[in-house]
Amino acid sequence: MKCGRKKVWLDPNEASEISNANSRQNIKKLIKDGLIIKKPQTVHSRARCRKNREARRMGRHTGTGKRKGTANARMPRRLSGCGGCVSCGDFLRSTAKIRKSTSTCITPCICRAR
């Protein structure tokens, strides 16, 4: 049947006949007759998980009581700092491209953004 003990259903009305089965051929016959059945898989729904994830995106369930790691483990300071630098530099470069300011003015600013 290729399943665990919890997934096998034995007909309670035919308990005596099932207990008399002492060979593999007898067991196969009982399976064919429908006295021994493999139970269907239980539903493993992700609906609850999706609902909770949406709530977390809105800021629910993220208070101090729900946190396990340190603040740095949850959002590393190093990465958050670097992201700001990169975005600032990109912004300055884009302004230089569209000629809102001169390159001589922008180069020191990009260096400072790093």
Image (cartoon, rainbow, N blue to C red):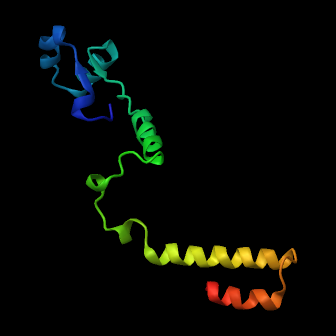
Say which quadrant the N terminus sits in: top left
User: In this orientation, which residue lies closer to the viewer: 58 or 23?
Assistant: 58
Q: Is residue 40 left or right of residue 30?
A: right
Q: Is residue 14 left or right of residue 36?
A: left
Task: Write down the quadrant of residue 107 in the picture.
Answer: bottom right
User: In this orientation, which residue lies closer to the viewer: 103 or 19?
Assistant: 103
Tally of numbered discs = 0
- Residue at image position (44%, 36%) is 51
Say which quadrant the C terminus sits in: bottom right
- Residue at image position (43%, 67%) is 75
Task: Write down the quadrant of residue 13 in the picture.
Answer: top left
Q: Is residue 57 above or below residue 80?
A: above
Residue 62 point in image, percent of width and height: 36, 51
Q: Is residue 54 above or below residue 20?
A: below
Task: Write down the quadrant of residue 98 in the picture.
Answer: bottom right
Residue 7 point in image, percent of width and height: 27, 29
**Residue reaching furthest to the right:** 99
Q: Is residue 14 left or right of residue 93?
A: left
Q: Is residue 91 left or right of residue 56?
A: right
Residue 29 point in image, percent of width and height: 29, 18
